[in-house]
Amino acid sequence: MEAIQEVAQILRENADKTVFVLSGAGLSAESGIPTFRGNRDGLWNKYNPQRLATFEAFEENPLLVWKWYLWRMHLIAKAEPHDAHRALVKLENLLKDFWHITQNVDGLHRRAGQKRFLELHGNIWEGKCRYCETRFGEKEFSQLFPLADREFLRNLSEEEFKEKILQGLTEEKLPRCPTCGGIVGPGVVWFGEPLPSEVLEKAYEIAQRSAVCLSVGTSAVVYPAAYLPELCKKKGGILIEVNPQETPLTALADYSFRESAAKVLPQIVQELEKLLR
Ligand code: BJW
Ligand code: ZN
């Protein structure tokens, strides 16, 4: 039997148990959103994304960090979910207790219609003051910082973005926290910051009880997220990896698909649908 069919069979056998996907930036790569550790866009290739995603970088140069985030927000605002996002929504509908645990902050899973998801690293459309811990929901944050409004960014052409944001943004225009006056940053989790505790606890609990874990489009080097598939495997679960590149999880995986998410996930779901018919 082909590996795709075997995996579909495994999902069918476990359709009444808990199954989760751990996803990373590779899931949204085919929507045109760059990964963290892959090829970089020319504009930003002199900066290491891993160094920009820290509070130290933000304290040192909030304008640079905000320009990088707004550049990504502009891409995300224009991006559309693709077949792999939609395949994960179908899995949620076909399986009894399916969870999509994502490291992605782009929200494309939600836009595709996913309901049972956990965002380990936060949400790029929200705001967070690191000086007093005040959090701002998307709506509230776009009022505080209209340049970060999703609709505004979606309607901005490349040229307008360069003019208004890359050239026109100054430190004085950055959002200030109404409580403490500090510069508010994006509502994501940077290196050295704790993950939201309720979300992480729920993710551990799901990983421990899951019969199957699919790791999709993540380099699996950032912890504690990368621990979730390991934990599932340790507890006797089956591990399936979808990634064009090898990762530290490959050696642990029962099945490894060296292909893109948009190619493999719809095939697995199609086979599963046949089995469940
Ligand atoms: C495709 C594809 C296609 C391409 N289809 N696939 C234990 C051991 C060692 C270190 C640590 C540890 N525990 C904690 C740490 C420290 C640190 C860490 O993990 N460091 C390692 C890098 C060494 N972790 C943390 O700091 C975390 N916090 C923490 O642990 O806090 C503890 C604490 C407690 C109490 C008080 C204080 C602290 C926080 C981690 C936060 C990570 N944040 C970022 C930025 C988010 C915001 C933003 O988006 O800007 O999250 S960094 C970045 O990496 C982002 C991602 O979510 C994350 C993971 O990357 P991901 O998604 O895997 O992307 P890539 O680019 O790495 O991989 C893409 C993959 O896709 C590749 O493999 C491609 O091949 C593949 N691909 N196209 C399928 N079409
Ligand atoms: Zn504050």
Image (cartoon, rainbow, N blue to C red):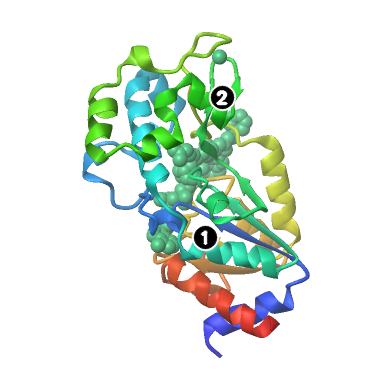
Q: Position of residue 193 (x, y in %)?
A: 55, 31
x and y, in percent, of residue 32 in the image: 35, 53
Q: Residue at x 61, y 67 (%)?
A: 90
Q: Residue furthest bottom?
A: 1
Judge by depth and name the residue closer to the eye, 42 or 138.
138
The nearer-to-camera label among 1 and 2 is 2
CB at mark 2 closer than 8 A to ligand 2?
A: no
Give the vertical position of 221 relative to 160 (above or below).
below
What type is the residue that disc 1 sits on?
A: His
Q: Are marks 1 and 2 in contact (CB under 8 Å)?
A: no
Q: Quadrant of residue 178?
A: top right
Q: Is residue 18 left or right of residue 28?
A: right
Quarter of the image for residue 95 reads bottom right
- Left-right relation of 274 to 97: left
Q: Position of residue 258 (x, y in %)?
A: 42, 71
Q: Which residue is mark 2?
A: 140
Q: Count the marks: how many?
A: 2
Q: Residue 85 bears which disc, if any?
A: 1
Q: Is mark 1 within 8 Å of ligand 1?
A: no
* Circle 1 SS class: helix
Inspect this view and state whether residue 51 appears: no
Label 1 packing within 10 angstroms: few (<14), some (14-19), many (20+): many
- In the rendered structure, which amino acid carries the disc numbered 2? Glu
